[in-house]
Image (cartoon, rainbow, N blue to C red):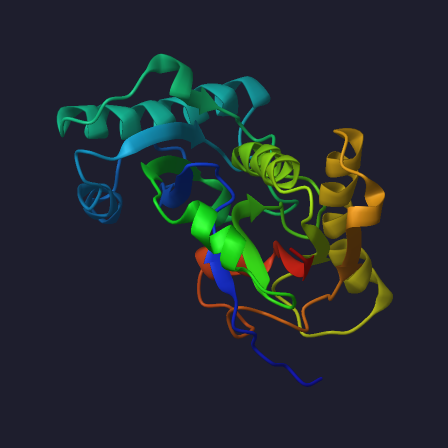
Amino acid sequence: MPRFFIQVMLLSTTIGFAQNKIEIYFETDSSQLTASAQSQLEHITADSQIASIYGYCDFRGSEKYNDSLSLKRAESVSAFLTNRGLSVTNNQIKGFGESQAQKKLSGSDRKVVLTFSQKSTDFKSRISSAQTGNKIVLKNLNFHNMSDKFLPESIPVVQELLGIMQANPKLRIEIQGHICCTIQSNDHYYGVSTARAKAVYDFLIQNGIDKSRLSYKGFGATRPLHPIPEKSEQERSENRRVEIEIIAN
């Protein structure tokens, strides 16, 4: 199956802010930061604004144990950042246990997702300069593998997309869903990508956006941002994405 890559405008859908995230991975049954994890965290500057620190587990162990372990992982990241002078509050720290775990044991489930924000000065200009046909990746709007279920850290992004639509009443978009990990072409894979786009479409309509301004479509894995097979969980996460195409602005 032919594969092609699209050039897109990278835009985080935060009004006044551009959100970014990193994923910190842990050893089995451990909440201790590895040397690699510490190196990742050391690159975060002291003036960064923490939005959330969410811990996760695979489904090894009991649900109660995993709830506790995921929170300890988030707390380990928080303690490391606090010791480096960053401000973190308790309500930014949560453990989700095995609630987002894949169906098979995977190291990608043993993690903390750290989301932070920085002020963005060019948000309005990017929206106003977007032309018909431009594609905009909704950064940090990610899904569980082969699912239309939003990851918890993605909820603010759909809320922010709603704000964009409300603030720009002439804006019309097509919501486009994509998956990762496979180059096979069948109805199931297209169905997942379509369901992801529809999840965003439904959220916007339920919150008052006229459906005449919206459409949605799934592309399966035919338009990856990274070559398949992906080299990391980060690449897989970015391939299973939603982006919007500007229809009118």
The front one of 162 and 42 is: 162
Q: In the image, is 139 to the left or to the right of 241?
A: left
Q: Position of residue 207 (x, y in %)?
A: 74, 29
Is residue 32 visible to us here?
Answer: no
65 in relation to 249, above or below: above
Q: Quadrant of the C terminus?
A: bottom right
For the point 25% across and 47% down, the residue is 40
Q: In the image, is 154 to the left or to the right of 18?
A: right
Q: Position of residue 115 (x, y in %)?
A: 40, 36
Is residue 14 visible to us here?
Answer: yes
65 in relation to 142, above or below: above
Q: Position of residue 172 (x, y in %)?
A: 72, 52
Q: Quadrant of residue 20 in the image?
A: top left
The front one of 199 and 118 is: 118
Q: Position of residue 36 (x, y in %)?
A: 24, 49
The front one of 117 and 179 is: 117
206 in relation to 101, above or below: above
How many callouts does the rendering have? 0
For the point 47% across and 58% down, the residue is 10
For the point 57% across and 45% down, the residue is 141
Q: In the image, is 38 to the left or to the right of 27?
A: left
Q: Quadrant of the N terminus?
A: bottom right
The front one of 163 and 196 is: 163
133 in relation to 126, above or below: below
Q: Quadrant of residue 130 in the image?
A: bottom right
Q: Which residue of the protein is positioned furthest toward the bottom in this rendering? A: 2
Q: Quadrant of residue 120 in the image?
A: top left
Q: Which residue of the protein is positioned furthest toward the left in this rendering? A: 84
For the point 38% across and 36% down, the residue is 114
